[in-house]
Every structure is written in structure tokens, then in C-alpha cells.
């Protein structure tokens, strides 16, 4: 296994527009005409959200897929003119498709640098943190190793250490 697996588990590599889409999902109907009449504001908000239309395709991380699907459903409920399709396929697929311009959102739970072969493609995208996954290593009760350091955990998760006897 290559790279630093612990870094991958941080979910900070949500490629390109994942965070932008989550933000867009939450920014519907933000305008106001300054009126203090709640009914007038509600009508204006409704008119603004109806004005949105188009399609968005998000592809990539299956770990992020439920989050994106839920956000897409909520957004489409408020914006009937918008169609959002969310598909899995893995982080590599999300990064590849976003750098190729094939989709609007490339979901990834790994750093783009870990998947992109042509560094020029990194300029086409922006990594945005949308969540962080906490990690707590748990071992079999028969393992006699206590108090692992971060460096020891890295060596285990990167495959450098494959036997408990090698943990020092």
C-alpha cells in the first residue's frame, strides 16, 4: 500500500465542487427586498428558487455519497428546476472525471494529489474539506502492545509493519 493511509482517512480531499455544492444546497433564497412583510419575503424567496434550473452530476467517493444524496434531495425539493444526479464509483473516479470536465462535482475522500497523475490537472480543481472522520484503532484483546504512537500507527496502516512483533 502506498502513501499515508491516515491522511486519506481525514476526508479532506473532497475534490473540486463538493463543498461548493454543499454550500449551494444551503444558499437557496438568500435575497430580500428589504420588506418587513414576511409574506412578501416568502414570495420573493419562492420566486428566486424557482428561477434555478439545470443539471448537476456528482461522481466519486461512496463514503461521501449518502451525504451528497441527502443534500441533493433537499436542494431539489426546494428547486424543482434542478436535477442533481449523485453516483458512486470511488474517489479516483470522482477526481478523474472532474479533472476531465465530465462532471460538475468529483467527490473524493483522499487528497487529489494522491490520484492525479498530471500535476497540471491539479490547477483545474480545488480540494475542499467537507468532513473529517475520527479514527480510533482497536486491537484484539490478545495483542500485548499498548500506547501506540502516531508514527507506529502510520507504519501499520501504510503496510510497513505487518506483524505486532515489529511494533517497537
Image: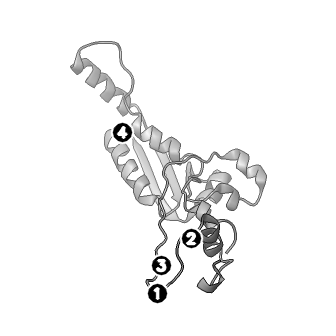
Rounded to the nearest whole Å, what is the CA distance between mark 1 and mark 4? 55 Å
Q: Which mark is residue 79?
A: 4
Label 2 or label 4, whichever lies nearer to me, is 2
Q: Secondary structure at mark 4?
A: loop
Q: Is residue 97 above or below residue 165?
A: above
* Residue at 46% in and 39% down: 23
Q: Mark 2 sits on what residue?
A: 148
Give me the residue at 30% from left, 29% from top.
46
Q: Secondary structure at mark 1?
A: loop
Mark positioned earlier in the residue sequence (1 or 2): 1
Tag shown at residue 7: none
Q: Which residue is mark 1?
A: 142
Q: Position of residue 130 (x, y in %)?
A: 50, 48
Distance of label 3 from label 1 (alpha carbons): 8 Å
N-terminal label among 3 and 2: 3
| Residue where numbered disc 3 is placed | 139
Within 10 Å of disc 2 (Cα), the crowding (few <14, some 14-19, many 20+) is: few
Amino acid at each position: 500500500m502506498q502513501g499515508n493511509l491516515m491522511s486519506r482517512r481525514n476526508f479532506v480531499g473532497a475534490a473540486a465542487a463538493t463543498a461548493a455544492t454543499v454550500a449551494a444546497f444551503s444558499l437557496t433564497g438568500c435575497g430580500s427586498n428589504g420588506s418587513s412583510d414576511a409574506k412578501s419575503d416568502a414570495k420573493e424567496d419562492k420566486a428566486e428558487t424557482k428561477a434555478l434550473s439545470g443539471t448537476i452530476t456528482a461522481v466519486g467517493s461512496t463514503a461521501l455519497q449518502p451525504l451528497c444524496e441527502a443534500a441533493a434531495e433537499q436542494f431539489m425539493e426546494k428547486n424543482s428546476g434542478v436535477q442533481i444526479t449523485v453516483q458512486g464509483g470511488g474517489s479516483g473516479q470522482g477526481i478523474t472525471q472532474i479533472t476531465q470536465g465530465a462532471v460538475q462535482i468529483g467527490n473524493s475522500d483522499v487528497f487529489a494529489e494522491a490520484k492525479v497523475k498530471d500535476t497540471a490537472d491539479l490547477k483545474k480543481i480545488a480540494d475542499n474539506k467537507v468532513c473529517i472522520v475520527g479514527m480510533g484503532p482497536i486491537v484484539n484483546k490478545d495483542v500485548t502492545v499498548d500506547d501506540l504512537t502516531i508514527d507506529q500507527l502510520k507504519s501499520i496502516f501504510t503496510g510497513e509493519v505487518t506483524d505486532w512483533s515489529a511494533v517497537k
